[in-house]
């Protein structure tokens, strides 16, 4: 499966993967302060386990940081 994460192409061996599984692979550990959009549509955190990523999805992962 071919997807794009933050403008970078990525090939996954899985044919089906949830948003949560992808995050566990991409950002192991604490996942607070993260927002996910798939094809320019925000995915609520409550849907991360059930939302399935499909071939050619464009995924944006945004992580909040502190600073000024």
Image (spheres, grey):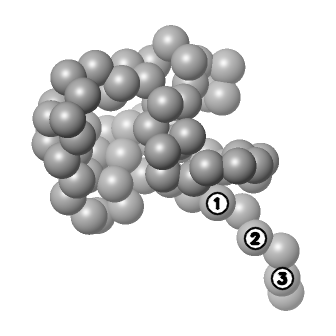
Q: Residue at x 48, y 45 (%)?
A: 25
Q: Residues within 10 Å of mark 2 (few under 14, many from 20)?
A: few
Q: Residue at x 31, y 39 (%)?
A: 39
Q: Quadrant of residue 13?
A: top left
In percent of width and height, residue 40 lies at 38, 43
Question: Is there CB contact under 8 Å for labels 3 and 2?
Answer: yes
**Picture layout, residue 26 above or below residue 22:** below
In percent of width and height, residue 9 lies at 20, 58
* Residue 25, numbered label: none
Q: Nearer the viewer, residue 28 or 18?
A: 28
* Residue position marked by numbered label 3 in the rendering: 67
* Residue position marked by numbered label 1 in the rendering: 63
Q: Quadrant of residue 20?
A: top right
Q: Residues within 10 Å of mark 1 (few under 14, many from 20)?
A: few
The number of callouts visible is 3
> From this viewpoint, which residue is outermost toward the top?
50
- Helix, strand or loop for disc 2: loop
């Amino acid at each position: 499966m071919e997807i794009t994460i933050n403008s970078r192409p990525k090939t996954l061996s899985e044919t089906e993967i949830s948003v949560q599984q992808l995050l566990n692979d991409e950002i192991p550990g604490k996942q607070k302060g993260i927002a996910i959009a798939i094809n320019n549509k925000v995915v609520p955190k409550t849907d991360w386990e059930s939302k399935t990523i499909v071939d050619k999805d464009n995924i944006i992962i945004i992580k909040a940081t502190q600073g000024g």
